[in-house]
Each structure stands twice: as structure tokens, then as C-alpha cells.
Image (cartoon, rainbow, N blue to C red):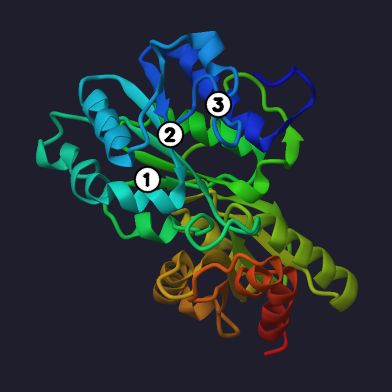
Amino acid sequence: MAELTGTISYREAVAEGIAREMRRDPTVVCLGEDIGAAGGVFKTTQGLLEEFGAERVWDTPISEQAIVGAALGAAMTGIRPVAEIMFSDFLACCWDYLANEIPKVRYMSGGQVKVPLVIRTANGGGLGFGAQHSQAVENWALTIPGLKIAAPSTPADVIGLMAAAIRSDDPVIVFEHKGLFASRGPRPPEGHVVELGRAAVVREGRDVTVLALAATVPTALAAAERLAADHGVSAEVIDLRCLIPLDMTTVLESVARTSRLVTVEENPHQGGWGGTVVSLVVEEGFELLDAPVRRVASANVPLPFADVLENEVIPTVDRVVAAVRSVVDY
């Protein structure tokens, strides 16, 4: 486990968040490839095997179908599994379980069977891992009714959202962004829980609302700093934290104050979560807007391996600044 200091890294927070729930609830177990003795390929499960033993921390074969299938069966019998899929790209390997089984069991059984299952996975680009290991795929899960979706941007939110996800009686996918693993932040107190579906206003502003998720939150905050310093623009930045449930109340309240909206997402522009959010703002708050909405998203191309090319695909501070200036100057 992480040392008891005032701050904690994002990667340490993953293990800490899981450990807190395993200490609290003996029905919580973990399973996945190399999560035991190896501590996880990203070192996000270090210390769990040593503290909880092999009866509750299960190293599995290299089979996403086996991992998720076993987790589904365990959840249906009253266990609360936390299953790791090493890279979010590999969710495609167990898509039948995700799309047709896990989110439908409770509904199709008339509530007689619950699936209190967490699937956690390393998501997103920015590290030059190439086209098959760098995708941000929250939008894949967003198309499936019955799945909850969390994507923390800070160590405190990792712990808080993990607690809420593990305690949920519905299946939750927790997307942990690879580009944030080394980042640090305050260690939250024991018992820290962040409600699923509650966005956070991480910077107040008056001129434009900027919506972000996971790794695009620090990008949006950096853009807001530059906009204030160089252009006198006051940007309000909202960390959505979850896509399902989606906190449109906080979004619409912010747009009512600023009258302008920019979304910043790492999903491809085609089918990204920003399109869903924008459609809801237009349906429910069109009269609040004084300018067209702008979306900053990844390009609709496979993620390049080379850093210089990858940076041309995913959202950057420069692109966010340009989008904000376009709506403010409209």
C-alpha cells in the first residue's frame, strides 16, 4: 500500500481505493492478469496480494472472456468482484459479456439477480503505446444501457469513485487514465466516497463552460489558466467524473451562468460523449446559449505511435484555447 503521507499518486490511489473496500467488506475480491504477485502491469494493485491473500486476489489466465465471465458468475452469487482488463482496448475481447449479459441480468430477472461488478481498466493515450493500446473508449460503454461509467481525474476521486462503484448493486466500468498514473494529489480521509453521477466544478468562471473528463481535465485547466492570463477570458471548468449517471443539472446550471459551452474529450469526435452532452444541452437549455457549442475531441483515426503524431490527434491546450476563443468572440 501507499505510504501514509499527505499526498498520494493516482496509481497508488487505485490500490488504496480497492484495499479500503476489501477491508470494509469481506465479499470484495479482485481478479485479473498479473494483479497478484506482479502488482499489476501499471503497479495499480501493489500490496493487495500481500494484505488479502490468494483467496481474495486472483491471478487469471490471459483471457478477457474468462476474467469477465468469472466475475459475472461471482457477482450473481453475492460476491463483489473487481475485475481488471489490462488495457481498455481489450474490452472488445469480452464485448458479448459487456453488451448482452452483464447489463441485462438484473432487468431480465425482474430484479431477482443483481450484478454488483466493477470492471476497471487502463484507458487513453498520450504515452505512445500505439493504435491497439491507446484508445479512450468510454464512448463504447456509453452505448449500452445498464452500465455505469466512471472516469476519475484525481487520486481523491479514484478512491471516492472506486468506493461508490464497488458498493453499487449495478455494474460499473471504471476507466483509469494511463496518462494520469504518475500525477499526485491530496490523500482523502478514510470513508471518502464520491457519489456516482455527481460532477465537480473544479474552476469557477463567468464567460464559458468547459466540460472535461479524466485526462482532459488537467488539459482544460491549463487552457483556462492561459485564457485568463493572455486573453482575459474567465473559463469555468467542470469535471464530469461520470458519464452514467450523467450530471446534467450541474452542466445546465453552469451554462446558465456563462451562456457558452465547449466540451473536451479524448473519445473520437465521431460518436464521442460530447455529442450526447451537447444534444442534451440543446434540448433542455437552448435558450441559455449565446454562441454555438464547440467540441474538442480526438480525430477519427487510429492512434499513432509517434509522439508528434499522437499529439496531433488527441486534445491539446492549444486546441481548447482556440475553441474557447471562437465561442467567446462569436
Query: In this figure, which residue is indicated by the disc labeled 2?
Result: 165
Query: In this figure, which residue is indicated by the disc labeled 1?
Result: 148
Residue visible at 37% across and 27% down in the picture: 60
Q: Position of residue 158 (x, y in %)?
A: 58, 36
- In the rendered image, which quarter is residue 310 located in? bottom right
Which is more foreground, mark 3 or mark 2?
A: 3
- In the rendered image, which quarter is residue 139 located in? bottom left
Q: Position of residue 29 (x, y in %)?
A: 39, 19
Q: Quadrant of the C terminus?
A: bottom right
Query: In this figure, which residue is indicated by the disc labeled 3?
Result: 45
Image check: 137 left or right of 42? left
Mark 1 or 3 closer to N-term? Answer: 3
C-beta proximity under 8 Å, tags 1 and 2: yes
Amino acid type at circle 3 is Thr
Image check: 236 left or right of 298? right
Few, some or many residues within 10 Å of mark 3 (<14, 14–19, 20+): many
> In the drawing, what numbered circle is on residue 48?
none
| Distance of label 3 from label 2 (alpha carbons) | 17 Å
Few, some or many residues within 10 Å of mark 2 (<14, 14–19, 20+): many
Q: Quadrant of the N terminus?
A: top right
Up-down relation of residue 40 to residue 197 (above or below)? above
Q: Position of residue 79 (x, y in %)?
A: 30, 19
